[in-house]
Image (tube, rainbow, N blue to C red):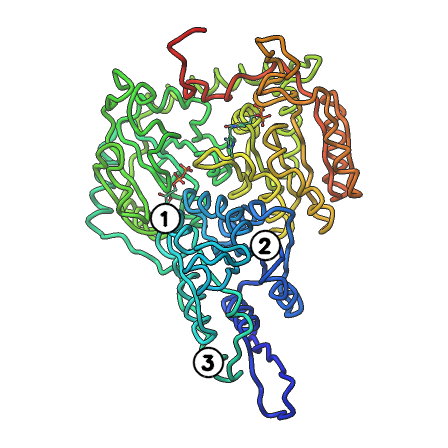
């Protein structure tokens, strides 16, 4: 990276020597000095000029139609690049719109910085009714990893350095940076301003695991007759792809990828136990978690999924957990061998430890898994080969599966309920960090923000598989996709509603049921409105043709894929999380 010349603001004074800089320029210089070249945001008081000046300084400024989408873009840019993604918003309402994305980023361990302009402190603190008045710092604090406010131009360097380090070091997460309107116009001597900036040295330092912790873990793994490795999105984030592949292949241990860890090794890998998940979880005797939490997505590590007698009972497995956060250990069940450190360093230490010799897992275990896997894969092949009219999730996803296979560099963004669950299980991923989805919260609304950022930071084609409800949360950003002419192909799985389109209003009144949308909606027309390509697809053949063309042309495309409105289930795979009423009527 070349050196960054500070932006010098010239004043109106006649004295040509009085070179000054100001808050606007110092913020931009601080970002650029730290290698941050992109801002996702939405202009307005007091940050409009900041967006202009950032663009003038050569930064990429991607403007959105709603701050939540800009925030989601920043978060996923952070996940993909290991640099904090920047989201820039106006005060109170813009800040709040961005805050949902900041909280989601923190929950998912994605590094981002929400920078919001704020109103005048003196008025805000006395609650005297300023324009967009809100004590943003106080509100942000419980929802992110760290929150800072800068009041003086000479502190911008420190503020930005603290925000960057907080976002990416240790367990990554969201950081809030509050910049009051007054700060931007504050001036200081340009040279002093330059000196006040900090280029953060080693923002995410390696965290080497203790040798005895590694030995304890390797000994436990060695003793196992039925070992299993679970790779989570922390493993994908860590960018230790070669080491992880080597660990899996050298140990011969079967593995399960969590949703966003798919593709860390190709899903077609012989050791993937994904197609035998419900067999391996209760059967395994030692489970090693690599950058995955034992949260609801893994049934808290206990209960029936793990072979426990009831919903809270321990299944008897021993756990090894590799994680950068020591507090993650024992969150739900005992971790017999905690290994605290960054995944790259931890996995390298494991590889070093097993160099002296390693016996592959017993063949009974591997054969039993393969048997289940092959049976389930054969069943899936049969289901995918069917061609019902209208299309269902399977016949449509059979097409998506082929398209991703032919274009393994494409990034797949995915949200919805059935549209999410079926895509995750049907569409194989071949490369790391190519699958981006609703993550830890199962949040709807990440679709277009993730798609924009994925296209911007990777330059690769993006395919967004969206439930029709899911799409609605960020659908207006198709204008953003067209405006920046991004190679994004959105496929809306249109089944006329949330989950399905078949509910009826039990009163017989004129309102449709709460889960039902306008029937036969044409989402493709929305894309056409902004000059993109809109396609209405009612068969797998039409869907295939449109997706191939989208990939070939790299043009913004939205395919309205008509799905049987009776297909799918309430909440997809997590129907059981819906509370049931004790009273029947
Ligand atoms: P998934 O949803 O895929 O199971 P989670 O988001 O639950 O994954 O877990 C990711 C875990 O990875 C978090 O506990 C986080 O602390 C950890 N993590 C993130 N980055 C790193 C890293 N570089 N090294 C070690 N652990 C990491
Ligand atoms: N709001 C937010 C922010 N996140 C959520 N997860 C929900 C609401 C609840 N919800 C789900 O969990 S999935 C979903 C909602 C509204 C949409 C499901 O419908 P869909 O997908 O059309 O997107 P399918 O394929 O028809 O199931």
Residue that mark 3 sits on: 195
Q: On the image, numbered disc 1 is attached to which residue?
A: 142
Task: Provide residue 200's location: percent of width, then percent of height.
Answer: 42, 68
Label 1 residue near ligand 1, CB within 8 Å:
no
Place of residue 260 in the rendered image (x, y in percent of width and height, measured from the top left): 48, 38
Position of 274 with respect to 88 (left or right) is: left
Which residue occupies 31% across, 43% down?
322
The residue sitting at 68% across, 14% down in the picture is 387
How many residues crowd around disc 2 within 10 Å: few (fewer than 14), some, or many (20 or more)? many
Ligand 2's image quarter is: top right
Q: What is the distance, in whole Å, between disc 3 and disc 1 at their CAs? A: 33 Å
In primary-sequence order, the first of circles 2 and 1 is 2
State the SS at label 2.
Answer: strand
Which residue is found at the position 41% from the left and 31% from the top?
256
Viewer-nearest of discs 2 and 1: 1
Which residue, given by chain and number where applicable, does mark 2 sit on?
40
- Label 1 neighbour load within 10 Å: few <14, some 14-19, many 20+: few
Residue 42 numbered tag: none
- Image height of 584 relative to 170, above or below: above
Q: Residues within 10 Å of mark 3 (few under 14, many from 20)?
A: few
Q: Are marks 2 and 1 in contact (CB under 8 Å)?
A: no
Q: Is residue 270 left or right of residue 354?
A: right
**Element under disc 1:** helix
- Quarter holding the N terminus is bottom right
Residue 284, image x, y percentages: 30, 25
Secondary-structure class at tag 3? helix
Q: Please identify the quarter of the rendering in which residue 311 is found.
A: top left
Q: Earlier in the sequence, mark 3 or mark 1?
A: 1
């Amino acid at each position: 990276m070349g050196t960054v010349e500070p932006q010098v603001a010239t004043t109106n004074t006649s004295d040509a020597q009085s070179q000054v800089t100001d808050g606007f320029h110092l913020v931009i210089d601080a970002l650029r000095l730290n290698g941050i070249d992109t801002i996702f945001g939405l202009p307005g008081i007091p940050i409009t000029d900041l967006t202009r000046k950032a663009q003038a300084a050569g930064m990429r400024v991607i403007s959105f139609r709603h701050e939540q989408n800009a925030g989601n873009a920043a978060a996923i840019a952070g996940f993909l690049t290991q640099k904090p993604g920047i989201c820039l918003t106006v005060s109170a309402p813009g800040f709040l719109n961005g805050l949902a994305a900041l909280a989601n980023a923190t929950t998912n361990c994605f590094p981002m910085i929400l920078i919001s302009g704020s109103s005048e402190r003196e008025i805000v603190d006395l609650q005297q009714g300023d324009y967009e008045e809100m004590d943003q710092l106080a509100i942000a604090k419980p929802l992110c990893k760290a929150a800072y406010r800068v009041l003086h131009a000479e502190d911008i360097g420190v503020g930005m350095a603290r925000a960057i380090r907080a976002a990416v070091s240790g367990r990554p997460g969201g950081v809030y940076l509050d910049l009051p309107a007054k700060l931007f116009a504050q001036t200081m001597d340009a040279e002093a301003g330059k000196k006040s900036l900090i280029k953060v040295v080693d923002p995410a330092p390696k965290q080497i695991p203790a040798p005895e912790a590694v030995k304890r873990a390797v000994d436990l793994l060695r003793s196992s007759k039925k070992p299993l490795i679970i790779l989570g999105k922390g493993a994908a984030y860590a960018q230790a792809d070669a080491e992880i592949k080597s660990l899996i292949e050298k140990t011969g241990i079967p593995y399960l990828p969590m949703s966003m860890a798919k593709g860390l090794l190709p899903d077609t890998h012989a050791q993937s136990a994904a197609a035998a998940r419900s067999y391996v979880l209760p059967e395994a005797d030692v489970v090693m978690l690599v950058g995955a939490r034992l949260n609801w997505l893994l049934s808290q590590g206990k209960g029936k999924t793990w072979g426990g007698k009831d919903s809270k009972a321990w299944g008897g497995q021993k756990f090894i957990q590799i994680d950068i956060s020591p507090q993650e250990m024992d969150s739900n069940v005992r971790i017999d061998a905690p290994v605290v450190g960054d995944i790259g360093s931890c996995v390298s230490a494991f590889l070093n430890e097993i160099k002296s010799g390693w016996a592959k897992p017993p063949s009974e275990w591997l054969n039993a898994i393969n048997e289940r896997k092959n049976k389930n894969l054969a069943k899936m092949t049969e289901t995918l080969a069917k061609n019902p009219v209208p299309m269902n999730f399977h016949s449509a996803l059979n097409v998506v599966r082929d398209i991703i296979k032919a274009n393994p560099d494409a990034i797949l963004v995915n949200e919805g309920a059935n549209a999410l669950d079926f895509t995750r299980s049907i569409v194989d991923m071949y490369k790391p960090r190519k699958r981006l989805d609703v993550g830890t919260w199962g949040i709807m609304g990440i679709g277009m923000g993730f798609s924009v950022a994925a296209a911007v930071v990777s330059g690769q084609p993006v395919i967004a598989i969206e439930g029709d409800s899911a799409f609605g949360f960020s659908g207006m950003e198709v204008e953003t996709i067209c405006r920046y002419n991004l190679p994004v192909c959105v496929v809306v799985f249109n089944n006329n509603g949330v989950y399905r389109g078949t509910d009826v209003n039990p009163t017989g009144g004129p309102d449709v049921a709460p889960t039902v949308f306008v029937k036969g909606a044409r989402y493709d027309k929305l894309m056409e409105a902004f000059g993109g390509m809109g396609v209405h697809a009612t068969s797998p053949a039409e869907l295939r043709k449109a997706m191939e063309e989208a990939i070939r042309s790299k043009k913004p495309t939205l395919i309205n894929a008509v799905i049987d409105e009776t297909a799918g289930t309430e909440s997809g795979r997590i129907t059981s999380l819906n509370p049931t009423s004790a009273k029947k009527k």
